[in-house]
Amino acid sequence: MSENSLDYEFISDETIIEIGNESSNKSSSKNGGDSHGKDSQRRSKTGKKELVKDRIMKAISGNARLIIAFVPITFIILLVIAILSQTIVIYTTNLQKSDFEKKTAEININLTTKIQEVNDKYTDERLKKLLTQDDLYVYTNAFWSYELTVNETLVKSDLVELPSSTSTVTITLREVKKPSNLPDSVISIGSVTRGDKGDTISSHIKLINDTTQGILLSKDGITTYQFVKQNLKSGNKIIIELSDQLGSKLKMPYTQINVELK
């Protein structure tokens, strides 16, 4: 009994050890198999997560590139709109300013003209009440000057002799009005027409026995009346006749002037 017990115990111990080892190995194998399966599952899940994450990152990256490309275009469009808006505002403002200045200038001109008309009318009425026509003529006579020329040579006598080779003769009467603050209706009394609106200097000079038409020009206070005779020959004669008023203005004691080609 005791031998069997010892053997049993001995075998039992080895057996226990072996069994323990086998159990450990089996347990390890089983646990290893389970761990391997779990690892595979974890790797599979991790792979799927990485794939999804990769796709999300690609989508985000593509959208980011789209946004980055879109932002400068949007900025340029907004900048162009702002510049155009500012240009339109400036153009409209300048147009309104120009229109305002134009209207203001027209108003000023009209106002100045009206004021001048009122002043002239008042001055004219007052002077003509205070002075006679002859008094006004004496006073305003100094504002006018006259000269008569033949071929640009001032006439100083009743005889003008020209070379026989002369083929064209130009006779010019020039009237010059000096600047004055007085109304034209008053100043014109001192002219050769003595303020007669129906009269001109052309009626105060003519050519005797000649049908040549005179040319009347007026600009900047200077009036000219001119005769031009062409195709003249030696021995031709031209007679100029002046009115008494014009002779007086020219300070000539005669009313006829002879122009002769020798």
Image (cartoon, rainbow, N blue to C red):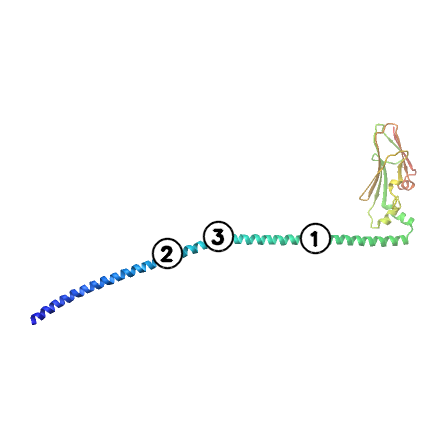
Look at mark 1 in the image and give the residue it sits on. Answer: 99
Q: Are marks 2 and 3 in contact (CB under 8 Å)?
A: no
Left or right: 30 as drawn, with respect to 48? left
Instruction: Tell me which numbered mark, 1 or 3, is placed earlier along the sequence.
Output: 3
Viewer-side residue, 13 vs 109: 13
Q: Amino acid at mark 1?
A: Asp
Q: Amino acid at mark 3?
A: Ala
Residue 217: percent from left, percent from top: 82, 40
Residue at 25%, 61% in the rendered image: 33
| Residue 50 image-quadrant placement | bottom left
Residue at 44%, 54% in the rendered image: 62
Look at mark 3 in the image and give the residue it sits on. Answer: 69
| Callout 3 secondary element | helix
Residue 253: percent from left, percent from top: 92, 38
Viewer-side residue, 58 vs 144: 58
Q: Within 10 angstroms of label 2, few (less than 14), some, or many (20 or more) residues?
A: few
| Residue 244 image-quadrant placement | top right
The residue positioned farthest toward the bottom in the image shown: 1
Residue 89: percent from left, percent from top: 63, 54
**Cα–Cα span, label 1 and label 3:** 46 Å
| Callout 2 secondary element | helix
Residue at 35%, 58% in the rendered image: 48
Task: Answer yes or no: is residue 145 visible.
Answer: yes
| Residue 168 image-quadrant placement | top right
Look at mark 2 in the image and give the residue it sits on. Answer: 51
**Cα–Cα span, label 2 and label 3:** 27 Å
